[in-house]
Image (cartoon, rainbow, N blue to C red):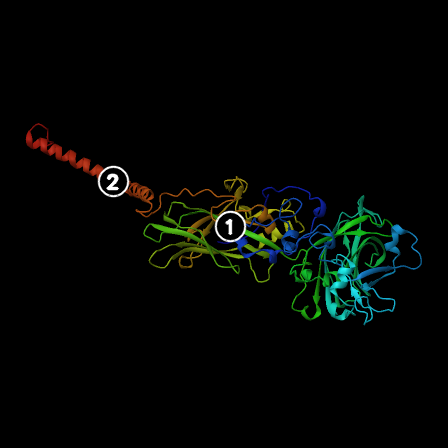
Amino acid sequence: AGGGGAGAGAGAGAGGGDEVGEGDEVLDVVDIYSAIRPEDDEEPDRQEVIDTPDGKPNAEWLVFRKHTKFTEPLEKTKEWTDLFEPSFEEVPLFQGRVRDYKRRNAEAVGVVKCRIKVFRKENETKAGKSELNPERDPEYFEVVSSDPSIPDALEKCRPYKQYNIYETFAEATVEVRVYCLKAFQVTPGGFMREENGEGMWLQYLEARLGDKKHESDVVKSLNPNFFHVFQFADCVIPGPSQLVITLLDASIAPQGMILSTKKIGTTTIDLEDRWFCQEWRDEKYKPREVRDLINEEELPGVSQGKLSLFLDIVDETKAAEQPVEDIKVLGKTLPMELRVIIWNTLDTAPKDSYTSDVYISCELLGVGQPKMTDTHYGVKVKAYGMFNYRLKWKCKFPEMNLEYLMRISVWDENALTSHKSIAEGVLPLKKLFKDCFERNQGKTSPDDMEFVFMTPRDMGQDTDADKQVLVDEENFKYPYIWYKMVHPNFGFNREKNSQAKLQLSIQVMPRAKARANPAGRARNGPSKLAEPGRPPQPANPILESEKCKAYIVYSIKEFFGRCKGTCMCLCCCLICGLILAAIAGIQMAFPGLLPIPG
């Protein structure tokens, strides 16, 4: 089987559907291969909660679904509010009086973080001794919120002691990783430029922690998708813990240098609250959160946009063992699903006298083991081998270790001896995968993604590809191609040495599209394929008596069908013999009755 190429087919349900809210901006394609489980290869899994705006899996959901999603800052959610009890008391510092109370956060020049505890001195006598024990000096006792009254607290005798702050909050050197995904619902502002009559923004993120500062790439969008990771190494906790992330609009010179910026909004995360929360540290996949971006100088308390991110803090000694998640793979790879439907065979070379028990084996070289159809028994040379059988593979493109070659083999099944090869070939599919990659790069909604089919035009055949289609039970159309296949023992001329003809459809799509438009393996639903119209097949006479009876009747009819010419000739000879015998008998019984030519 030779040739290769790609043709586009409109996907089921393709069209529009703009997302709203967090998903209102088209995402770049991200690497979602690592998010797909092995069992997804056979049947689509539907048990997961898909929390996308349209309820359909998209690229972002597939990558980050293991990170629980929250639509507000983590410290404000009911699941985490009580767990994030402040590790320290925070006291803002100001220079002089606060001039504008509404903008007080913008006027703060720093924060003092401390732990404050109040101890109650027990009652004393006029002599300055303890009322409970006049022989000793009065002591100080700790009072906690759970004590019903001060006398009860005193009875518990929790004496004053100087807490060791270094034991309670052990110092650690950590690496802070901030995974900034995207900004959305951003209020138009900044420099208010125009391009082609429409607003144009050049936005980037700036992250500060103590005296360290990092910046992301500039993205040309009002609601930019960053998928950027900020890394702060050698950070000491307790220490500078106010992580400040700012969305900025930039004015850029032709040489690419940033000339000036305007702040859109800022959000601040306290790292010590996270680090000293054991429940948060125990989370293997840190939760995603959405934080408001606020510009305290211009509109205090009013959100100017939202930033989707998740945060991780790793002990410096374990940083090498826990590599940074690779979320910045924009456009590098695209997970795909290959679907092949084996429809029919024709002109199959016989291996068992005049028939063959045919099945098809397909292998995407480098991706798992070969996959096979069921067997059609007793296929004659000029009869169709009927299958209607779907096979599926998942892979990604581009992949350096894959050549995207499919080996297709037609086999004759034997119960007692080894199976016999009827024909085989290798079909190149790289062009098909490349076309699918180029058509779907930058798309994230399954509604916008496309199926890509191999069509007769790709094989150089002069046929009407739009009419050369078959359908499933949902009336989805599949363009098909007939391949002439050969065997090395009989030569490689596909016109003279063809050992079988194979009718199949080949379809490639992004995995997100495959999840939104699932199809079962073999003939199973969804997108169920019709049962092949095979004649009765051999069956167990005890367990499947009706099928066995039908097969026997069919075999008898087939026998007489094959011997039709011979039987007619024998019948004619028999009739002629009977006629001659009758004439001879009459002549012997009644001599002279029938004139005999002289």
Question: Foreground residue, 202 or 378?
Answer: 202
Contact between labelled residues 2 and 1, with CB atoms less than 8 Å apart: no
Where's the C terminus, which quadrant?
top left
Mark number for residue 567?
2
| Residue depicted at 84% across the width and 52% down the height | 295
Tell how many labels. 2
Per the model, the C-alpha gap separating discs 1 and 2 is 44 Å
Q: For the residue carrying disc 2, how many other residues have a C-alpha within 10 Å: few (<14), some (14-19), or many (20+)?
A: few
Location of residue 85 by image quarter: bottom right
- Name the spot of residue 297 as percent of width and height, x first: 87, 52
Name the amino acid type tagged 1.
Answer: Val
Vertical arrangement, residue 552 with respect to residue 408, above or below:
above
| Residue depicted at 79% across the width and 66% down the height | 132
- Name the spot of residue 447 as percent of width and height, x first: 63, 44
- Name the spot of residue 411 as percent of width and height, x first: 40, 54
Vertical arrangement, residue 226 with respect to residue 237, above or below:
above
Could one spot residue 106 in this view of the protein? yes
Mark number for residue 209?
none
Q: Nearer the viewer, mark 1 or mark 2?
A: 1
Callout 2: helix, strand or loop? Answer: helix
- Name the spot of residue 197 as percent of width and height, x first: 81, 43
Question: Foreground residue, 584 or 265?
Answer: 265
Name the amino acid type tagged 2.
Answer: Cys
The residue wearing badge 1 is 340
Q: For the residue carrying disc 1, how many other residues have a C-alpha within 10 Å: few (<14), some (14-19), or many (20+)?
A: some
Vertical arrangement, residue 282 with respect to residue 523, above or below:
below
Earlier sequence position, callout 1 versus callout 2: 1
Could one spot residue 7 in this view of the protein? no
- In the picture, measured across the screen, residue 498 lies left or right of residue 462, that is left
